[in-house]
Image: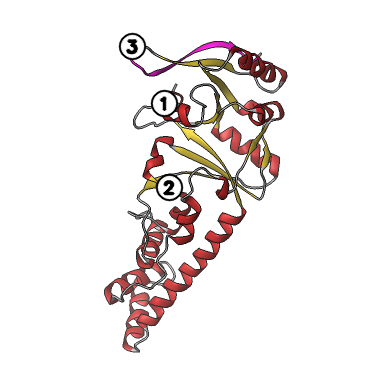
Amino acid sequence: MINQNSIYKFFPYNPHDLDTLANNYLWFSRFSDFNDPFEDVFIDNVLDTEIPPYNESEAIELLKLANQGSASPIQIEQSLTQLALQGELRAKYEYVLSSTIDHAKSIFADYVENSRLCCFAKDDIEAEAAALQNKLMWSHYGNGMRGYCIEFDRSALIKSIHDSIGDLVGYTDMLYGNLVKQSHHSILHQTVLGMFGKKSGIGIGDLVTTKSSEWAYEKEFRLQVENMNMVQFNPKCILSVTVGFKMPESKFTTLQSVLRGNTGIDCPIFRASINAKTFGIEREQIGKTK
């Protein structure tokens, strides 16, 4: 049941949900439409507005890293020594910090304004925990097991959307942690370290993919496009459909009709239910779309 290349979209079951299956599209939302009210606020305010207290050894370390590869280590050392002798090292350091952070803030603002995002759950490979057995996902997004979940082939879905929109599709795993202010130096330092595969903390790029740790149960994976809400996909990307055991029979009949009416969907249908002995979620195959 656990698959590294599968991603899962839970639906509560409403007319819009059925329409996505009938017409092969996914809805990509703005940040302001998310049920997490902290995301755009965090991105807008995560960076401290003040330059941190000057520390010459930190400044030298950062500028060495930032210039790595542009000249030999000896030449970089000589250049920084010359700046220090001329009393210009601090100004150079603070300029690099402020200009980089100002640029990042501009990019963040544009990202929040123009990005449209579609969110999925993943299997927790390390913990060997399947998304389809995640009680909170079924409760919060699957309408208390009255809805359903679509399993997608992640690679095929990304390629399909790329082919559909004629543009690259952004995608990322979400990070989870405490939402705290980040210092200019720390962010820039980790960003530069990341260029050499040595990052041990949060870099600039991580700020738009970080959520509060309360959401970690989602194991969220996101797709991102620009300024498009309704995005077409190839239905062959669908690997399975799992319905919650509390879905009324009349709604299940309607869902089956929609699935079978879509000539591109060819996959097994499962029912997820609660084991009365273990209280875990199990699923069994109950049919196929074709």
Left or right: where 49 falls relative to 160:
left
**Magenta-drawn stretch contains 128:** no
Q: What separation in Å lies between label 3 and label 1 (alpha carbons)?
A: 15 Å
Tell me the number on the disc at residue 211.
2
Q: Residues within 10 Å of mark 1 (few under 14, many from 20)?
A: some
Find the distance from the CA under tag 2 to the CA under tag 1. 20 Å
Q: Earlier in the sequence, mark 2 or mark 3?
A: 2
Whole-percent x, y for residue 154 in the image: 54, 33
- First in residue order: circle 2 vs circle 1: 1
Neighbourhood count class around disc 3 (C-alpha, 10 Å): few under 14, some 14–19, many 20 upward: few
Could you tell me which secondary element the residue under label 2 belongs to?
Answer: strand
How far apart are the alpha carbons under marks 2 and 3? 35 Å
Amino acid tagged 2: Lys
User: Which structural element holds mark 1?
Assistant: helix
Residue ID at (31%, 76%): 54
Using residue 282 as the reference point, say whether residue 28 is left or right of it: right
Cβ atoms under marks 2 and 1 closer than 8 Å: no
Residue 21 position in % (x across, y down): 66, 27
- Numbered badge on residue 135: 1
Disc 3 marks which residue?
Answer: 277
Q: Is residue 280 magenta?
A: yes
Residue 53 vertical position relative to residue 138 in the rendered view, above or below: below
Which circle, 2 or 3, is nearer the viewer? Answer: 3
Q: Which residues are magenta?
A: 277-289
Q: Amino acid at mark 1?
A: Lys
Residue 112, picture quadrant: bottom right
